[in-house]
């Protein structure tokens, strides 16, 4: 053994503690963990979608009220109502109709965002479920209204949208408006779900 030479400690490679971000194996481990978590917790989350739908309804009522207050402040004498707009689109002006459509987009975007934020995976699917719940509730309320009377149609008592069901006489404009409403709210809810899911992706990257 040579004098003056410091002996290097022997390190057992199998006992080395892997530090996150140290090498490519960290990414492999993370991807494996994500796959396991997705298999266990991924897919449809009905609870998150339900609360997302509640948020969408609440935002619709809130934003419609704000819009009505603004319309009154600027001297608009007509009624700002989603139900009235769907029953008779000609009863509201073009500007009000566009504003109400934007309200629905924001409301369902918010509902999708909440559902995606509550679910770690499949944010777009959670937003889709928010939209499906809204559609199912609309159909059920309409059926109850037909069978039991209009007094049992809950959607007529609060100013929330009847997705896909134009009120009043069925016209070409009403059908086109219903299709635009369906597609617009669907895309808004799915986009909100995807954005809400990004929070979990940022947390995963920080760990």
Image (cartoon, rainbow, N blue to C red):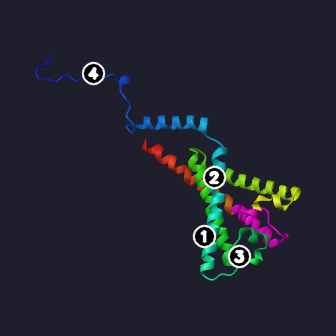
Element class at badge 1: helix
Residue at the spot of label 3: 79
In the shown orientation, is residue 202 left or right of residue 59? left
Task: Name the one closer to the observer, 187 or 46.
Answer: 46
Q: Is residue 165 left or right of residue 159?
A: right
Q: CA distance from mark 2 to mark 4?
A: 57 Å
Q: Can residue 31 be seen in this snapshot?
A: yes
Secondary structure type for disc 2: helix
1 or 2: tag closer to the N-terminus:
2
Residue assigned mark 2: 52
Q: Residues within 10 Å of mark 1 (few under 14, many from 20)?
A: few
Foreground label between 1 and 2: 1
Question: Which picture quadrant has residue 131?
Answer: bottom right
Mark pair 4, 1: CA separation: 71 Å
- In the rendered image, residue 176 lying in the magenta stretch gets the answer yes
Residue at 77 percent of width and 63 percent of height: 156
Q: Are marks 1 and 3 in contact (CB under 8 Å)?
A: no
Indicate which disc, 3 or 4, sits on the residue closer to the N terminus.
4
Q: Earlier in the sequence, mark 2 or mark 4?
A: 4
Quarter of the image with the N terminus in it: top left
Label 1 belongs to which residue? 66
Q: Nearer the viewer, residue 9 or 75?
A: 75
**Residue to which mark 4 is pinned:** 10
Q: Secondary structure at mark 3?
A: loop
In the figure, is residue 123 to the left or right of 92?
left
Residue that extends furthest to the bottom in the rendered view of this protein: 75
What is the residue that sits farthest to the front in this orientation? 151
Foreground mark, 4 or 1, reads: 1
The location of residue 184, given as percent across then percent down, is 68, 63
Tell me residue 198's x, y (percent).
52, 50
């Amino acid at each position: 053994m040579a004098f003056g030479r410091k002996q290097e400690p022997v390190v057992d490679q199998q006992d080395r503690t892997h530090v996150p971000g140290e090498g490519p194996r960290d990414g492999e481990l993370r991807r494996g963990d994500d796959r396991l978590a997705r298999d266990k917790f991924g897919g449809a989350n009905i609870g998150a979608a339900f609360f997302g739908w509640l948020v969408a309804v609440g935002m619709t009522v809130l934003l419609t009220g704000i819009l009505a207050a603004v319309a009154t402040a600027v001297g608009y004498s007509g009624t700002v109502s989603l139900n009235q707009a769907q029953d008779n689109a000609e009863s509201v002006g073009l500007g009000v109709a566009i504003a109400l459509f934007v309200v629905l987009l924001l409301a369902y975007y918010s509902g999708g965002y909440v559902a995606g934020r509550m679910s770690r995976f499949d944010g777009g699917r959670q937003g889709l479920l928010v939209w499906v719940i809204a559609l199912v509730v609309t159909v059920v309320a309409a059926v109850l209204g037909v069978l039991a009377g209009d007094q049992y149609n809950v959607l007529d008592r609060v100013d929330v949208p009847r997705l896909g069901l134009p009120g009043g006489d069925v016209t070409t404009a009403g059908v086109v408006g219903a299709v635009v409403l369906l597609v617009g709210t669907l895309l808004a809810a799915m986009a909100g779900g995807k954005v809400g899911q990004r929070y979990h992706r940022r947390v995963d990257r920080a760990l």
